[in-house]
Amino acid sequence: MPIVAIILDAIAVGGYVVQDHYRTPAIFIIGLAVQIVLTVILLGMTFSYGGKRRQTHDLPFKGYHYTTLRYAIIIFSMIINAVATFLYLLNFLNGGSSVLFQ
């Protein structure tokens, strides 16, 4: 699943590059739709992850639980894509705001 999350991030970056190159309203709408779909897929992956979510450790300070690297990659990818979706939505609602595409 972490590899799938990284591939989805690569697709999101590719979509951003295409939008930045063409900058037409139709491309912005398609990019927003793709970003929403990618974020929903990553959200589903975050909640349906079947592997270990927390590491076991034998450190003297008990009570701290660290996420595994695999689960952290999925969570980080989902958070970044959710923020990007919000920025795409602001760009769409404001009629081409310069927050995302400068």
Image (tube, grey):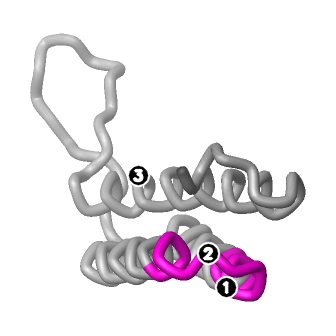
Query: Residue at label 1?
Result: 27
Quadrant where the N terminus sits is bottom left
Which residue occupies the foreground of this view, 67 or 29?
Answer: 29
What residue is drawn where x is 30% and y is 74%? 6
In three-dimensional space, the C-alpha distance between marks 2 and 1, rounded to whole angstroms, equals 7 Å
Residue 49 visible at all: no
What's the amino acid at mark 2? Arg
The quadrant where residue 89 appears: bottom right
Q: Secondary structure at mark 2?
A: loop
Residue closest to the eye, 92 or 44: 92
Report x, y in % for residue 12: 46, 75
21 is higher (above) or lower (below) than 80 = below
Local crowd size for mark 2, using a 10 Å CA cut-off: few (<14), some (14–19), many (≥20): few
Q: Which is more foreground, mark 2 or mark 1?
A: 2
Q: Amino acid at mark 3?
A: Phe
Which secondary structure lies at badge 3? Answer: helix
Measured from the top left, where is residue 73 in percent x and y?
31, 58
List x then y, in percent, for residue 99.
63, 44
Name which residue type carries label 1: Ile
User: Is disc 2 in contact with disc 1, using a CB cutoff of under 8 Å?
Assistant: yes
Residue at point 52%, 66% (across, down): 46
24 to the left or right of 94: left
Name the residue carrying label 2: 23
Q: Which residues are magenta?
A: 18-32
Q: Which residue is mark 3?
A: 76
Identify whether 53 is placed above or below 35: above
